[in-house]
Amino acid sequence: MDHTMVESLYKNSLVGNTDSSAVDPQKITGDIKFLGKNEKGVIVIVNCDEAPFLPDAHLGFLIKMLGACKLSLADVAIVNICGDIVISYDRILTELNPVKIIFFDVEPQSLSFPLSFPHYQVQGYNNMKLLNAPGLARLEKDVAEKNLLWKSLQKMFEL
């Protein structure tokens, strides 16, 4: 058996993998990029391929929502998971030190969070409050969804 036959049999092997789609170790290390100053440990996680963080319209909507919760961009860290950096639960904990996390159109389990919960349910976990919600584009257009989100935010931020 020559080496080309062995390579064809084990092309997906973990050893000696030269597949360019494999995760680059540099994409796992380094600081998580975010918009805001993260002064209050409120992490907003989005999945947006249209802009580095959020398109202006969605950002404006989010800023209004944060204002209603008595927060500003200085208080939060907006993290866009769409990109080259691999972001996980452990990295979020160590790099951002969250107190509250809001997921917009991102399933917590996709970031290795060890739990799953429905939209609009404020979930306590590991001394944090978590909230899972639909994407900002959907929320902007649907009054009923906005009301559900507002009730959850009131609970989360004790307004």
Image (cartoon, grey):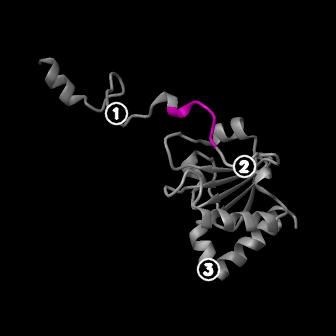
113 and 35: which one is in front? 35
Image quadrant for the N terminus? top left
Crowding at dot 3, Cα within 10 Å, few <14 / some 14-19 / many 20+, comes out as few
Looking at the rendered structure, the kind of residue marked 2 is Gly
Image spot of residue 100 (x, y percent): 76, 52
Residue at mark 1 to residue at mark 3: CA–CA distance:
41 Å
Q: Which mark identifies residue 69?
A: none
Question: Which numbered disc, 2 or 1, marks the residue closer to the eye?
Answer: 2
As helix, strand or loop, the secondary structure at mark 2 comes to: loop
Residue 36's disc is 2
Mark 1 vs mark 3: which is more N-terminal? 1
1 and 3 marks in contact (CB < 8 Å): no
The kind of residue on which mark 3 rests is Asp
Q: From what the image shows, is residue 120 above or below residue 95?
A: below
Q: Is residue 120 visible?
A: yes
SS of the residue under disc 3: loop
Q: Secondary structure at mark 1?
A: loop
Q: Residue at x 72, y 78 (%)?
A: 147
Task: Name the residue at 36% across, 27% down.
Answer: 14
Q: In the displayed orientation, state which residue is furthest to the right.
A: 159
Residue 72 on image: x %, y %: 79, 57
Mark carried by residue 20: 1
Question: Is residue 144 shown left or right of residue 70?
Answer: left
Residue kind at label 1, given as amino acid type: Ser
Q: Which mark is residue 142?
A: 3
At horizontal 53% and vertical 57% (from top left) the residue drawn is 48
- The range drawn in magenta is 27-33
Q: Residue lying farthest top?
A: 2
